[in-house]
Image (cartoon, rainbow, N blue to C red):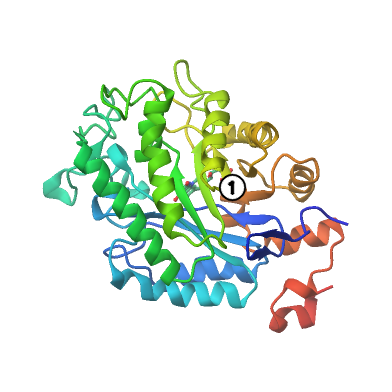
Amino acid sequence: MSALFSELKIKDITFRNRIGVSPMCQYSSTDGVANDWHLVQLGSRAVGGAGLIIAEATAITPEGRITPQCAGLWNDQQIEPLQRINQFIKQHGAVAGIQIGHAGRKASAAVPWDGGAHLDNDNGGWDMIAPTDQAFDQDGTRLMKAPRRMTLDDIKTIQNAFVDSAKRALTAGYQLLEIHGAHGYLLHSFFTPLVNDRTDEYGGDSQGRAKMMLETVEAVRAVWPENLPLAVRLSAADWIDNGLTVDDNIQMAAWLKERGVDFIDCSGGGATPAARASVGDRTAQQVGLAEQIRKQTGVKTMAVGVITDAHQAENIIASGQADIALMARQSIRDPYWPIHAAEELGVATKAFMPIQNGTFVGT
Ligand SMILES: Cc1cc2nc3c(=O)[nH]c(=O)nc-3n(C[C@H](O)[C@H](O)[C@H](O)COP(=O)(O)O)c2cc1C
């Protein structure tokens, strides 16, 4: 009996297995609107057997996009193409999830294949907001544009925008909502002392710095149906002196659990240029943080970071490090990874392959 291929039921949602596709920016939207690329990219991973597909960081306001080509849910026109995609994902047995977020001072950037540096306003960029007025990269060459320090009115506006996007996500047919609270983007940048230099009620000690994240999650939970799971992605450690430690995030996870969060998705890094990157081989250490957060708080966790091998993923679930194993780069390499993993673990595949395929090669 495989743990990786066991079902998981949270609220009214049943995941057919514990394999999830981690959110991945596609930089392929026009005005935040999804298209056939997203249908094929996400749909093929549902056909490939994943239990959960989390769509990319989707901006709650136009200014919250990382790049001009990022996805959005700030208007109603953005809903319909997502409904089509989600219908397909669900038809093929996967749970449709989405990550909503705001990029804060890391917004207004060029797409990675154009170098990823900040764009000037006369070159497709825009003004950014953040808890601070300090640029992400003060001495470097990439993300050097300074944001405007958010007022209390800005904070309310952004919290309302999270709520509105959550409602649109529901209309779009998503079954799991993830709030992006990691990687140096807006909510994480409020929580980490590496960025938050505020002297008002949204700064200072851990409780002050957590206030933006907690209020936002509370407001979203109030409109996201009780019977559907809510996740928050955290940078479970900043991995740098004077940054957030896993203990800070154990506390945050406990606060979030009290507010009705079902999953903590345990990522890491991204707060400053000197902090560890959120993508790369060192993310493997994040799996241990998912275990600590799960054991200390009792909250369900998703583990992510260099999960590539069937036995490795099986062990993460079987040993109780996490409830779902998320994959990003391995899922890019192999959309059919769950089928290959099942074959390796001796699990029958026919039941979760589309009939057009399983009839001929399913076991
Ligand atoms: C192309 C690409 C896009 C990504 N976009 C997002 C994103 O939208 N939201 C997010 O939280 N993480 C994003 N990530 C990070 C991944 O979700 C994941 O946490 C990280 O790549 C580590 O997992 P891996 O070792 O399986 O790749 C992205 C990673 C890649 C490779």
Indicate the position of residue 353 as horizontal and vertical percent values: 72, 74
Residue 83 picture location, percent across and down: 44, 75
- Which quadrant of the structure image shows residue 93? bottom right
Residue 172 vertical position relative to residue 127 in the rendered view, above or below: below
Q: What percent of the width, then of the height, locates residue 229?
A: 57, 57
Q: Which residue does the image show at 43% across and 37% down from the upper left?
A: 183
Q: Which quadrant of the rendered structure holds the C terminus?
A: bottom right
Q: Secondary structure at mark 1?
A: strand
Q: Residue sitting at 61 percent across and 50 percent down?
A: 327
Position of 224 compared to 261: left or right?
left
Q: Position of residue 205 (x, y in %)?
A: 39, 20
Name the residue located 63 percent from the left edge and 44 percent from the top edge: 301
- Residue behind mark 1: 263
Amino acid type, callout 1: Phe
Q: Nearer the viewer, residue 356 or 132?
A: 132
Number of on-image labels: 1
Whether residue 359 sits left or right of residue 271 in the image: it is: right
Within the image, what quadrant is residue 352 found in? bottom right
29 and 92: which is toward the camera: 92
Q: Residues within 10 Å of mark 1 (few under 14, many from 20)?
A: many
Quadrant holding the N terminus: bottom right
Q: Is residue 230 left or right of residue 58?
A: right
